[in-house]
Each structure stands twice: as C-alpha cells, then as structure tokens.
Amino acid sequence: MEVTVTVNGTQVAADVADRTLLVHFLREQANLTATKVGCDTSSCGACTVLLDGQSVKSCTVLAAQADGRSVTTVEGLATGPDEFHAVQRAFQAEHGLQCGFCTPGMVMAAVSLLKENAAPTEDEVRSALEGNLCRCTGYHNIVRAVLAAAGERVAQ
Amino acid sequence: MIPASFTYKRARSVDEALELMAEGGDEAKYLAGGQSLLPLMKLRLAVPETLIDVGRLGELSYIRDEGGHISVGALTSHHHLASSELLMRDVPLMAHAAGQVGDPQIRHSGTIGGSLAHADPAADLPAVVLALDATLVAQGPTGTREIAARDFFVDLFETALRPGELLTEIRVPKPDQVGWSFQKFTKRAIDWAIVGVAMQGGNVALVNMAQTPVRAGGVEHALSSGSDPAAAASHAAEATNPADDLNATSGYRKHLARVLVRRAIDEARSRS
C-alpha cells in the first residue's frame, strides 16, 4: 500500500507491504537509522519515536497506522548542525549514555515526558522511562540528564 | 520480526468498520492501538488475513459525565484515561490502573476497548471494569447491545462479543462506596501482573488468577458479613485456577492473591 508519513517535517511516501512496521519504514524508506530495532517486542524502547507528538514504540506500530500522520525521530530534534535540542544537550553534558544504543529512544521518551510534564520529579522521570532499557545500566546519568533538561526548559 | 502477510483496511466510520468486518469474515480482526495484537502477530500467535484499523475513529475516543455513570469510548487511550480529571475525581480506580498499564509509549497507543476485547487474564483493565460492575456496549450487524462486565470475559482471550461485533463504549457507574485500591505485583516495572487486585468498595476482582479476570466472591462475602481484613483476605484464592508459568507457580500466585487482597482492603478502607 502507499504510505505517506511526514517524518521530521518532510513527507516520505513509499509503496510498502501492508505488514511493514513503522521502525522499518523509518530506517529503510526514510533512511533514518538513528531509531534502533532492539528487542523487537515492545519492551526495550530503543525504537521510540514521536507519533503526532506522543512517544510510541515504532516496532509495534504499522507504517500504515502512521499514514498521513507526523513522526519525529531523534534526527528531527536538532534545529541546525550545532543547534541541539535541550534534551540532547543535557544528555551530552550529564554523560547520559555509554554505548549509545538506547540513547535515541531514551531521548525521545524524555522529550515526550517533558511535553506532558515540564517539571518532573526524579521519581516521575524514572517512571516515565520505565519503557526504555539501558543494558549499560547508565540510568543515573540518564535521569540526571532529563532533570537537567527540564530545569533548562523551566529556566527558559 | 514482522507479522505474517495480511491485508490492511482502514475504517472511516463505525458503520464502515462493521461492513469491512462482514466482508472479512472469520479471518479478519479489528486493530485498535495494536499494543496487544501486533506483538502476537509478530510471534505468529495471531495470523489474521485482514486487519481492519479502527484506530482513527475519533468518535470512539471520549470520557463523558452522564450523571450516574461515566461513558468511555472504546478507543480512548490508556494515557487519556490516566490523565482524565473526570475519572480521577469520580472513578480514580480506573484512572490509576490505566496509568499502570505497560509504559508511557504503550499507554499512548493502547486503548481500553482493545485491552478488554483482547481479554488477556494478565491485563489490568479487564479486572478494573469487573470490579466496577461496568457495562460494555457492542455494536454489530444487527444493532447495539449491552453486556455486563461479569458476562463479558468468557475464557482465555475469549469474550462475549459475537462475530462482527465491535466494542464501542464502556459505561462505568459512579461508585457508591468510594474506597478503592489497585495492586499489581510485577518483577519489573513494565511486566504484566503476576497477580493483581482491583478493589472498589466491597467489590474485589483479581488479575491473572484464572483464565479470565475473576471476582473474589469469598472475600466479598466475608467483607459484607463483617469479617476483619485478614480473615476476609484469607478467602482470596478460593475458586481460582492460576497458571504455573515462568513467572510464578500456581501456589505462589494463590499466596500473592491473599497478600495483595489484604493490602487492597487496607488501602481501600484508608480512602473511604
């Protein structure tokens, strides 16, 4: 079927099999490979993207379900080569990553959280990231990064 | 993993969904948020020939105050339930439990109707509607009918919905007895409940203690007869048939049920 998705502000249209998952559409049709296939069972969150502004696990969404809608991947957050999103800057400053595989999903889950709750407590950050696994177990710095990003938003 | 091949069709209205289902027959399934169905399809545990996507039917996404009860559209997401001020005020059990389903990503996509129609005994919301004595509304080729939550869950992944019917609304009576509790025991945050308890007033429903969510009749009877919480909770595993699986033995689940019901009774009383 013909699927058209606005990915990071650009329309991407492709004729794909009905069973195509959104994560594969993003990686193979939109050629945006930051979004990872991790567990492929909607547990790990490495495939997290925003669908119409809300975080979803793109391994458990059909490309067809996103037809006509907007998707934001981590590639779509920065506004310029050195103009990173507040959450990206915070992950960098707080060293919120080790191997980096979970990072795109963590960042997108954090962006979604901060849209819903601009000033979360540490407990709220931990709860909001329950769908994202870090096999390096770098959670402390990830949580610090999200709290730092929230502080920055509040300060702005 | 990708699912086995199927034909995707998107319904633009409830009527069109019913028509598409009539055409699709036994091998067609409705797709709501897909958070239960798509994982099963990826594992080939479900292999529908046709998926009828009802996920865009915004007319079935609402939470309305109807006076004596609250009407919830079947396609209301868990996220909307959990953040509904109306539910938090009048049926906090439902808002709180919806906020415990899966994780934020799953709650953004998953819907109450999808969860109920899927009828996984380990799911949270089936036990919640059972404890609340909700009424489920189904629309089918021959019209609309109401099904009591008590009659809805028939067997493992099996409901009282007839072929072709679409669950459209959940009507939740505003509880007379305000004390409530939701207990969910998991090994990790996003896991399915090993055992769960939904309690509203004197109604107690159990998650994952049988092939369907079940009411703990022994506990309810003991409570209405004036038993103290410990004595009432000791009846929690009566007439249950929990599974033995990787997460827990049947015996451990029965023990958990008694412990969690005790906690639920204490918490519900503290809120009444």
Image (cartoon, grey):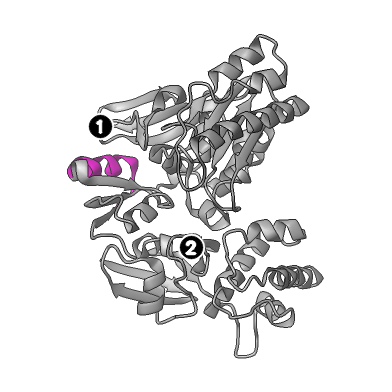
Q: Nearer the viewer, residue A119 or B13?
A: A119
Q: Is residue B232 left or right of residue A63?
A: right
The outermost residue toward the right is A155
Which chain is home to disc 2? A
Label 1: element kind: loop
Q: Is residue B33 left or right of residue A13?
A: right
Can you tell which of label 1 and label 2 is closer to the viewer?
2
Residue beneath label 2, please? A57
Residue beneath label 1, please? B141
Residue type, label 1: Pro
Residue B28 placement (x, y as % from top left): 24, 46
Query: Is-magenta flag for residue B227?
Result: no
Q: Is residue B39 above or below residue A155?
A: above
Q: How many marks?
A: 2
Q: Nearer the viewer, residue A3 or B219?
A: B219
The image quadrant where one finds the C terminus of chain B is top right
Q: Is residue B179 above or below residue B115?
A: above
Q: Is residue B8 left or right of residue B131?
A: left
Most common secondary structure along the magenta stretch: helix
The image quadrant where one finds the N terminus of chain B is bottom left
Residue B211 placement (x, y as % from top left): 41, 32
Residue contact at pointers 1 and 2, CB within 8 angstroms: no
The magenta span reads B10-23
Whether residue B71 can be seen here: no
User: How far apart, in angstroms, are the residues tagged by discs 1 and 2?
Assistant: 34 Å
Q: Is residue A35 above or below residue B26?
A: below
Q: Nearer the viewer, residue B183 or A110?
A: B183
The residue at 55%/31% (across/down) is B254
The residue at 73%/27% (across/down) is B266
Residue A19 falls in image quadrant: bottom left
